[in-house]
Image (cartoon, rainbow, N blue to C red):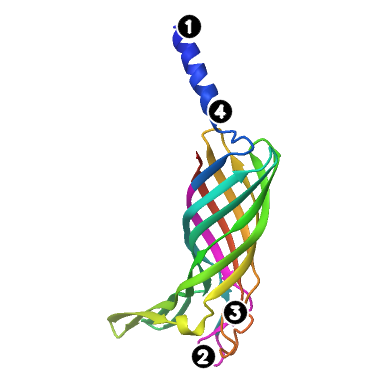
Amino acid sequence: MKKLMMIAAMMVAAVSANAQFEPGTFSIQPKAGFSIAWLTNMPKLPISTYTTLDKSPIVGAVIGAEAEYQLTNMISLAAGVNYSLQGSGWEDYELKSGSDKVELKDAKVELGYITIPVVANFYLFKGFAVKAGIQPGFLTNAKMKATIKGKMEGYNATMDVDEDMKDECKKFDLSIPIGVSYQFQVPVTVDLRYNLGVTKVNKESVSGVDDSKNNVISLTVGYKFAL
């Protein structure tokens, strides 16, 4: 029994040692999570002369990988490649008249990007880091989406709006990522970031949303492998 406990203790110590990532070591980290995204200066969505809908954030997916080089015990540099779903939405709307009803749901602009975050990590204490850097992004898809449901005189109808708007958006995006992360002994890393948009999303020819920029809060979980 004592020998078994000693072996188990040695295995735990070995895992902990491997999780430290000493200076001069490389690691790679597949990661996945979700984001809450919105566009600045997005106009309200006009429904009628007297009705407009306020904007709301959308929830999207983030998936990718990151490579990290440990410069010292306290500083590392990391670069990654992610797919990030961004954009912005509007609140739902419902209009009733007797038994008739019209609903507008999930109205949003979806923007897909391949992002390349490059950040410096500053480890304030074991496992905990604050980070900042720069993140170029490249547009892969852009769509306006919504679902319209109607009920009139006992008949139900549903229409899905799925309009491509890639030609109206700039292909390049730049943001500044700042955030924090914590690496457990496993070593699983939880990463929370805020990406502040720097460049405009829409081309200048698009009126009303010329100054819109991406803003994204993302939470991901990754697993680090030493190389």
Q: Residues within 10 Å of mark 4 (few under 14, many from 20)?
A: some
| In the depicted structure, whether residue 188 falls above or below residue 52 | above
Quadrant placement of the N terminus: top left
For disc 2, the marked residue is 48
For residue 114, which numbered disc appears in the image? none
Q: Amino acid at mark 1?
A: Lys
Q: Could you tell me which secondary element the residue under label 4 belongs to?
A: helix
Q: Residues within 10 Å of mark 1 (few under 14, many from 20)?
A: few
Spatial CA distance of label 2 from label 1 is: 77 Å
Tag 2–tag 3 contact (CB < 8 Å): no
Q: Could you tell me which secondary element the residue under label 2 belongs to?
A: loop
Earlier-in-chain disc, 4 versus 3: 4
- Can residue 102 be seen from the camera position used here? no
Residue ID at (62%, 34%): 22
Q: Amino acid at mark 3?
A: Met
Residue ID at (55%, 93%): 49
Q: Amino acid at mark 4?
A: Ser
Magenta-colored stretch includes residue 48: yes
Q: Amino acid at mark 2?
A: Ser
| Magenta segment | 30-51
| In the depicted structure, whether residue 138 falls above or below residue 189 | below
Q: Residue furthest right?
A: 124
For disc 3, the marked residue is 42
